[in-house]
């Protein structure tokens, strides 16, 4: 049988490709990875869910606010919006963060609370399989323990999962005066 039209050529190619593709593997669903931002407070390796951190910035110029707790560093103008910058080491451990070249602000917006969290250093994105999460915690974590939600372990660190939800749910964090 001679192929006479472009439509017949396409039909013949379709049949040929379908026969050839019959032995290819079936697409299998892949588990979603747990993705977090690695950072450090008081030399402790921590992770926050990627969904909880909207932006990471170097520390911007700050406007001091009189009458607030010492861990409130001030207000920052981030793209035309004022937001409080909170020193997480001072909030959790009572010691101010020494701002250096590695210091960063994690911008969080959770449950109506928008703030910049000052941390000592950011280690970038970390990916884990959901099954690698463990609910355990080190017993000597101190004040940060109430804000943790388990750990992930890689070849270098035991990453403590920092829960922004738990942070913004506490009265101690919300009361800045």
Image (cartoon, helix red, strand yellow):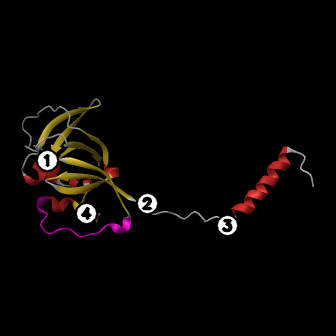
> For the N terminus, which image quadrant?
bottom right
Q: Main secondary structure of the magenta part?
A: loop
Q: Nearer the viewer, mark 4 or mark 2?
A: 2
Tag of residue 149: 4
Q: Would you say 67 lies left or right of 118 here?
A: left
Mark earlier in primary sequence (1, 3): 3
Residue identified by numbered label 1:
175
Q: Residue at x 25, y 57 (%)?
A: 163
Residue identified by numbered label 3:
23
Which quadrant would residue 143 be assigned to in this image?
Answer: bottom left
Mark earlier in primary sequence (4, 1): 4
Q: Rounded to the nearest whole Å, what is the CA distance between mark 1 and mark 3? A: 63 Å
Q: Secondary structure at mark 3?
A: loop
Q: Residue at x 75, y 62 (%)?
A: 19
Decide if residue 65 is in sight here: yes
* Label 2: few (<14), some (14–19) or many (≥20) C-alpha neighbours in 10 Å: few
Decide if residue 112 is in sight here: no
Q: Secondary structure at mark 1?
A: loop
Q: Are marks 1 and 3 in contact (CB under 8 Å)?
A: no
Q: Which residues are magenta?
A: 130-143
Q: Nearer the viewer, mark 3 or mark 2?
A: 3
Q: Nearer the viewer, mark 4 or mark 3?
A: 3
Q: Which is more toward the observer, 18 or 95?
A: 18
Residue identified by numbered label 2:
32
Q: Which is more toward the observer, 126 or 130?
A: 126
Q: Would you say 13 lies left or right of 2 here?
A: left
Q: Are marks 4 and 2 in contact (CB under 8 Å)?
A: no
In the rendering, at what x and y percent does residue 16 appear? 77, 58
Q: Which is more toward the observer, 66 or 51?
A: 51
Q: Secondary structure at mark 2?
A: loop
């Amino acid at each position: 049988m001679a192929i006479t039209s472009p439509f017949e050529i396409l039909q013949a190619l379709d049949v040929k490709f379908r026969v050839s593709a019959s032995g290819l593997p079936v697409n299998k669903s892949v588990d979603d990875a747990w993705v977090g931002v690695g950072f450090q407070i008081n030399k402790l390796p921590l992770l926050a869910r990627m969904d909880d951190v909207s932006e990471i910035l170097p520390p911007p110029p700050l406007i001091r606010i009189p009458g607030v707790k010492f861990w409130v560093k001030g207000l920052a103008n981030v793209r035309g919006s004022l937001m409080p910058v909170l020193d997480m080491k001072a909030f959790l451990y009572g010691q101010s963060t020494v701002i250096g070249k590695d210091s960063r602000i994690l911008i969080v917006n959770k449950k109506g609370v928008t703030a910049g969290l000052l941390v000592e250093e950011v280690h970038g994105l970390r990916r884990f399989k959901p099954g690698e999460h463990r609910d355990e915690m080190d017993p000597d974590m101190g004040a940060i323990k109430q804000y943790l939600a388990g750990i992930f372990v890689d070849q270098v660190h035991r990453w403590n999962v920092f829960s922004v939800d738990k942070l913004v749910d506490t009265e101690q964090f919300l009361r800045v005066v």
